Amino acid sequence: MENNLPPKVLKIARMGHPALRQRAREVTDPTSPIVRKVVDDMIETAKDFGSYSGLAAPQVHIPLRIILIHVPKERCDEMDPEGFPLTAMINLTIEPLTDKQHVGWEGCMSVPGMMGRVARFTHIALSYQALDGKMVSREAKGYLARVIQHECDHLDGILYPQRMTDFGKFGFMDEIVRYTMKPKKTAENTPITPH
Ligand code: NI
């Protein structure tokens, strides 16, 4: 019955809410209609937000290990020349494939209006279950790897400011885009989309 309802926009928890601080639970059956409903509502919520790269279920008060990832081709490397299409990842696990980290800008729907610089591994391996229950294993680099690490942190109750080492590089997105990014139009400085 519930599953026949149209998808709805869910409330996004903001930094400080306990929903963002707990470890999310594994999903026992990724093929269940309840999981499909959660994913549909997450997609509706992300679309309603506007421009985004990812969303984790704990951000919409659902303590399950489910994330969405969506990265346009301009932000993907040669591994995904057409971009990374909107994908639901269930029971995601990641592992760095290098010691190398890159410091880049991040934003988060749960920390609205803000952005900061965070070090992330440049190359990771990931495994997750798709909505049909099948295991998917692959690698990711660059911005895609960054977004996946950011979402994976949400599943463990960690927000990106907790990963920051220099709070001189934290501030309001509109001011940083205006004063820090505009003079230097490089790929490195492309404004981020919140996750
Ligand atoms: Ni986030």
Image (cartoon, rainbow, N blue to C red):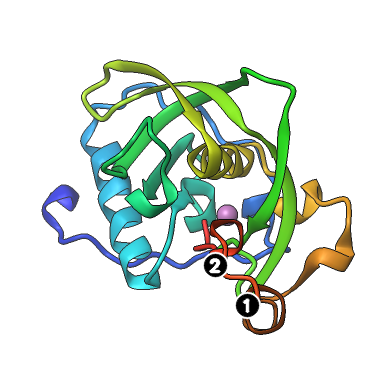
What amino acid type should be assigned to the residue bearing mark 1?
Val
Q: In the rendered image, is residue 28 in sight?
A: yes
Q: In the visual, does 110 lie left or right of 80?
A: right
Disc 1 crowd, CA 10 A, few/some/many (<14, 14-19, 20+): some
Q: In the rendered image, is residue 159 in sight?
A: no
Residue at image x 68%, y 61%? Answer: 17
Q: Position of residue 118 (x, y in %)?
A: 73, 50
Figure quarter occupied by ligand 1 = bottom right
Tally of numbered tags: 2
Residue at image x 71%, y 83%? Answer: 179
Q: Position of residue 86 (x, y in %)?
A: 29, 46
Name the one closer to the observer, 72 or 78.
78
Mark 1–mark 2 CB contact (< 8 Å)? yes
Name the one closer to the observer, 53 or 66.
53
Q: In the visual, does 44 lie left or right of 119?
A: left
What amino acid type should be assigned to the residue bearing mark 2?
Pro
Q: Position of residue 191 (x, y in %)?
A: 54, 67
When the figure is inspected, residue 61 is found, relative to residue 156, above or below; the finding is below
- Give the quarter of the image for residue 97: top right
Name the one closer to the observer, 34 or 144.
144
Residue at image x 67%, y 72%? Answer: 114
Query: What element does badge 1 sit on?
Result: helix
* Residue position for label 1: 177
**Separation of marks 1 and 2 at Cα, in angstroms:** 7 Å
Q: In the visual, does 121 lie left or right of 80?
A: right
Residue at image x 43%, y 61%? Answer: 52
* Residue position for label 2: 191
Disc 2 crowd, CA 10 A, few/some/many (<14, 14-19, 20+): some
Query: What element does badge 2 sit on?
Result: loop
- Give the quarter of the image for residue 169: bottom right
Tag 2 or tag 1, which sits nearer the N-term?
1
